[in-house]
Image (cartoon, rainbow, N blue to C red):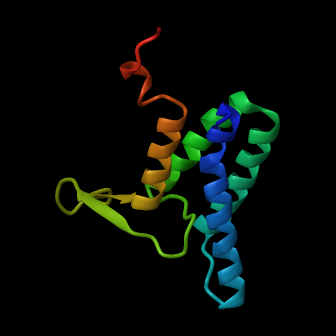
Amino acid sequence: MNKKILSGIPIFILIVTTTILFILGIKNNIYITLEMYLALFLVIVTFILFLYKRNWYKYAIKIILILGTFNLLRFTYSVSTFSFYIGENSVFSSIEIQIFSLLILIIELVLNGVLLKPYIKKT
C-alpha cells in the first residue's frame, strides 16, 4: 500500500468517530461537551494539514492523540479510561488514560515506522 494512504488511516478513523459522535449527539439530544467540540475542531485542522502540509500533519496527529490519550479531548461519546493515582489528597493525584486514543496513537506510531524502525535492518 502507498505510504501516504497508510499514514492517513489514524485521521480517517478520527473523522469517522467524531462524525458518528456528533450525528448521534444531534439525533439523540446527547450533551456534547467542550472536549468534544475541541476534538472536532482539531480533527478538521489536522485533516486539512494532512491534505496540504504533510510535514505538519505528522506532528499535529501525534499531539491530538496525546491530548486524547490523557483525556483532554474526546473523540467518542463513551470513554473508557484507566486511572493512575499519584500521592494522597492532591488535586493532580489521578491521571486518566483513554484506551481508544491510546490505541490510535499506537497505530499511528506503527504505521509511520516510529516503533518498528529500530528493529528493521536496512538492506
Percent of width and height locating residue 99: 40, 60
Q: Nearer the viewer, residue 99 or 73?
A: 99
Q: Nearer the viewer, residue 106 or 2?
A: 2
**Vertical arrangement, residue 56 with respect to residue 72, above or below:** above
52 with respect to 83 (left or right): right
**Vertical arrangement, residue 122 with respect to residue 108, above or below:** above
Q: Nearer the viewer, residue 9 or 90?
A: 9
Disc tally is: 0
Q: Tell me where residue 15 sits by quadrant.
A: bottom right
**Vertical arrangement, residue 93 with respect to residue 19, above or below:** above
Question: Which residue is located at x 58 percent, y 48 percent?
Answer: 64
Percent of width and height locating residue 22: 69, 75
116 with respect to 112 (left or right): left
Residue reaching furthest right? 52
Q: Quadrant of the N terminus?
A: top right
Question: Which residue is located at x 68 percent, y 34 percent?
Answer: 2
